[in-house]
Image (cartoon, helix red, strand yellow):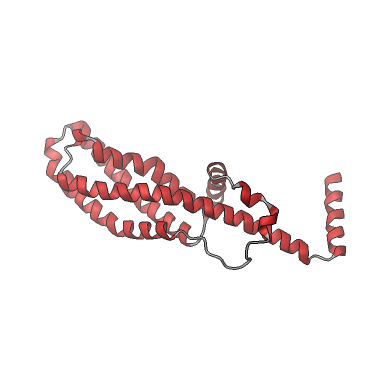
Amino acid sequence: MEATLRRTMNTVTDTLFPVSKSMKDPLKHQNIKAGNDYVTNLPLQMAIYFNSFFAPFWITVTIVGLEVKYDELNILYKITLIAVYITFTIIEVVRLYVGYTGNLMERVPELAGFWLLTLLIQFPLILLMLFNEDARILPFERAVNIVETCFVVFEIVCGYIAIRQMVNYQVTKFHLRQFTDLTDMTDNEYWLEQRNEVHEHSF
């Protein structure tokens, strides 16, 4: 299950974040230092970090606000808001966790999952809670929703940049390792490997 999910996220990542043409140039690989370089996006990591501390405060304010205005809402909005708040809270916990670990450990599938959850689920929901006047938005609710919206928008932008940089770096590092392995290979090893490949394709 986990392997299938990772393959799916890799496929989505390759589609949404194609490798730039400059990274496909083999001449540029020689200019990249082979080592333990870090491509973790610092602004994104800081945003996720502070958003993790703000999330419990947002949940508390939201629950208090729902309790205050609950009797004034019609039955449709009572059900809708409860469903929206529960969905947003669950997704927020998962989103912040995969975003924090994905960016810190430079894991593209986790970071792509974080970005998709932020863009496709959290962003529409927070806009609904911020601009839907029929939900009887209270002043303190609007205040915390504005802050949460700023976090979400900032994380969408920084997340996209972080994934592009991480994908380009990992693809370049992969080609650089191939180039290094080919350089270190002796002539006999090279021709033996080529003969084996031809032999395999012949069958």
Determine whether, in the image, residue 15 is placed left or right of residue 122.
right
The answer to which quarter of the image holds residue 194 is bottom right
Residue 89 makes an appearance in the image: no
Identify the residue at horizontal 35%, vertical 42% (top origin): 123
User: What is the quadrant of residue 169 in the picture?
Assistant: bottom right
Q: Is residue 70 above or below residue 60?
A: above
159 relative position to 7: left or right: left
For the point 41% across and 45% down, which residue is it?
Answer: 117
Q: How many marks?
A: 0
The answer to whether 59 appears left or right of 186 in the picture is left
The image shows residue 66 at horizontal and vertical percentages of 18, 44
Residue 191 rendering spot, x and y as whole percentages: 87, 58
Residue 27 locus on image (x, y percent): 70, 55
Seen at 30% across and 39% down, the residue is 127
> What residue sits 58% from the left and 53% below the top?
168
Q: Is residue 171 above or below residue 36?
A: above
Residue 56 seen by the camera:
yes
- Split into 4 quadrants, where in the image is the C terminus? top right
Could you tell me residue 58's position as x and y percent?
24, 52
